[in-house]
Image (tube, rainbow, N blue to C red):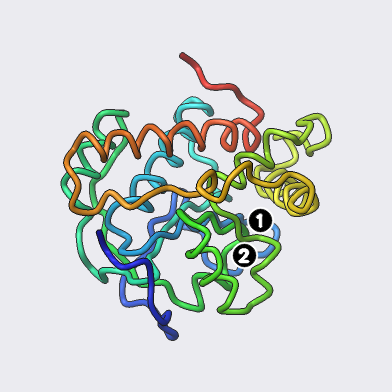
């Protein structure tokens, strides 16, 4: 398995972001909401999570992109410019999600500064993001932690989708942060998505299922639309 992280680079990325609705510039204020998925190499877990998030959002909203929502990813030991692992692409194909055009990125300060919500694969990744500063603590969660918190939020307390996805998403993050000290994980492992790097496709598929299940209530809360089965 790949190492769980290292010192995180500063400066500007040479590659483009992986945004859904990515035509909007960074720093567009209240009109833009950025979700940043973080893992180690940015070739397995975070690419799967990024592309499944985009796929689920499009599926819930009838394939009509939401221009103010950007979904991207990076790695604490990012394989800059690398394609995602072939098994990760195969998992995405299983879900009907698009794996094309992906290139890995190393996590930079600017990614954290721009992100409105950071979802990490593990608690160690979460700690590394928060250690970068930028007041990231209240908007950085592990994916499974955020799922647990979102399940406890009454959707009726969130702004309607008609007010814009960005406004609804910011309210969701604030509500989740407020619950964090009250809804603890039943065990340390409960908030972890383990690294499938170098593992057979069967393990990749089990991780893909974990990620997909964790994303379901998050996307439902963001859009107010339940999954169509």
To which residue does mark 1 refer? 31
User: Residue at point 24% right, 33% down?
Assistant: 93
| 213 sits to left or right of 198 | right
Disc 2 from disc 1: Cα separation:
6 Å
Q: How many marks?
A: 2
Residue 222 x/y as whole percent: 63, 38
Q: Quadrant of the N terminus?
A: bottom left
Extreme residue toward the top, this view:
229
Element marked by disc 1? helix
Label 1 neighbourhood size at 10 Å, few (<14), some (14-19), many (20+)? some
Decide: is 96 above or below 173: above
Label 2 neighbourhood size at 10 Å, few (<14), some (14-19), many (20+)? few
Please give the label number shown on residue 77. Answer: none
- Name the residue nearer the viewer: 163 or 59: 59
Residue 102 x/y as whole percent: 27, 55
Decide: is 18 above or below 132: above
Extreme residue toward the right, this view:
157
Element marked by disc 2? loop
Extreme residue toward the bottom, this view:
11
Residue 157 x/y as whole percent: 83, 35
| 63 sits to left or right of 113 | left
Residue 87 x/y as whole percent: 19, 43
- Name the residue nearer the viewer: 195 or 216: 195
Please give the label number shown on residue 28. Answer: 2
Q: Quadrant of residue 207?
A: top left
User: Residue at point 26% right, 69% down?
Assistant: 79
Disc 2, disc 1: CB below 8 Å? yes
- Name the residue nearer the viewer: 98 or 130: 130
């Amino acid at each position: 398995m790949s190492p769980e992280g290292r010192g995180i680079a500063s400066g500007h990325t040479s590659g483009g972001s992986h945004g859904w609705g990515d035509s909007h510039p960074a720093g567009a204020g209240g009109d833009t909401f950025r979700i940043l998925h973080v893992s180690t190499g940015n070739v397995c877990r975070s690419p799967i999570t990024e592309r499944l998030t985009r796929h689920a959002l499009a599926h819930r909203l009838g394939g009509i992109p939401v221009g103010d929502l950007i979904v991207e990813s990076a790695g604490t030991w990012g394989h800059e410019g690398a394609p995602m692992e072939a098994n990760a692409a195969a998992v995405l194909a299983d879900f009907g999600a698009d794996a094309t055009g992906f290139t890995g990125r190393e996590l930079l300060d600017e990614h954290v500064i721009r992100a409105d919500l950071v979802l990490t694969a593990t608690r160690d990744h979460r700690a590394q993001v928060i250690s970068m500063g930028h007041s990231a603590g209240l908007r950085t969660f592990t994916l499974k932690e955020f799922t647990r918190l979102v399940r406890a939020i009454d959707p009726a307390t969130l702004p309607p989708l008609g007010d814009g996805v960005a406004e609804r998403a910011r309210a969701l993050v604030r509500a989740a942060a407020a619950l964090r000290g009250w809804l603890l994980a039943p065990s340390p492992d409960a908030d972890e998505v383990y690294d499938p790097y170098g593992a057979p496709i069967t393990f990749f598929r089990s991780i893909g299922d974990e990620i997909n299940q964790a994303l379901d209530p998050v996307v439902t809360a963001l859009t107010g639309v339940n999954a169509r089965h």
